Amino acid sequence: MTTDQSPAPLRRRGERMRQAVLAATVDLLTSEGLTGTTVAAVARAAGVHETSVYRRWKTRENLLLDALGSHADEALPEPDTGDVRQDLTQLMSAVADYLASPQGAALLHLGASPDAGSVEAARLPYWDARLERGEDIVRRGVERGELAPDTDARLVAETLAGPLFARVLLTGASLDRGLARRIVDLTLDGARPRDGRAATG
C-alpha cells in the first residue's frame, strides 16, 4: 500500500498545461516559500510530468519568473483617473501590497539573486514592462500640465519603485499603509511646473 497521494500525471498540453503549472507554482510559493518550490514539487501539484515542465521552461528560474510575472500582472492595476498623484498612489500602493506578499518578495529576490543570470534575458524586459506602467501615468500627467514638460518619466517611475525595493531587499523595513502616498508626494513635489502654473502641452 502506497502513501503517495500525489495525483497521477495528466496529459495536459499547450495553454492548459501552462496555466496548471503556473497556478501550482504560485500556490507553492505561498505555502512553501522560494526554497520549497522545486520543479518536482510543482509538477506533482499540477499533475503533469516533470519532464514536461523542463521541456517548456528549461530551468526552475524561468518557471518562477513566468509564474510570478503573470501573477503580478493580475495583481497590479493600470489606473487612469485623470489625476497623476492619485494614479501613481494607486499603482504604488498595489506594488507595495504585492511586494509584501510571498509571491512579490520572491519575484524581487529572484531578480536580485546571484544566480539571476540564468533569467537575465527575460528579467530585464519584465521589469521594463512594469516600469512602463508608471511611465505612462507620468506622461499623462505631463500632457495635462500637472508635471513639468521636461519631467523624466522613467526616472520618476524608478524613484517611486526604488524605496519599496530597498525595503524588501536591503533594510527589511515594513511596507506600511501610507508609504506609497508619502513616496509619491515626495517625488512629485520635485516634478511640478517650476513657475507654479500649469504647463501647456
Image: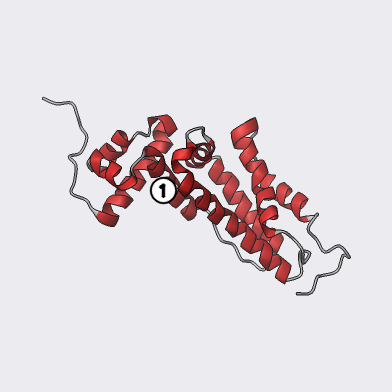
Q: Position of residue 59 (x, y in %)?
A: 36, 40
Mark 1: which amino acid?
Asp
Q: Quadrant of the N terminus?
A: top left
In the displayed orientation, state which residue is furthest to the bottom.
Answer: 201
Q: Position of residue 172 (x, y in %)?
A: 62, 31
Task: Report the front residue among 10 and 115.
Answer: 115
Q: Position of residue 168 (x, y in %)?
A: 59, 36
Quarter occupied by residue 133: bottom right
Q: Judge the density around disc 1: few (<14), some (14-19), many (≥20) Cα neighbours within 10 Å.
A: many
Q: On the image, numbered disc 1 is attached to which residue? A: 66
Mark 1: secondary structure: helix
Q: Position of residue 121 (x, y in %)?
A: 47, 48
Q: Which residue appears at 73% of the width and 47% of the height?
A: 182
Quarter occupied by residue 112: top right
Q: Locate residue 42 relative to residue 136 in the image: left or right.
A: left
Can residue 178 be seen here? The reply is no
Q: Locate residue 99 relative to residue 140 in the image: left or right.
A: left
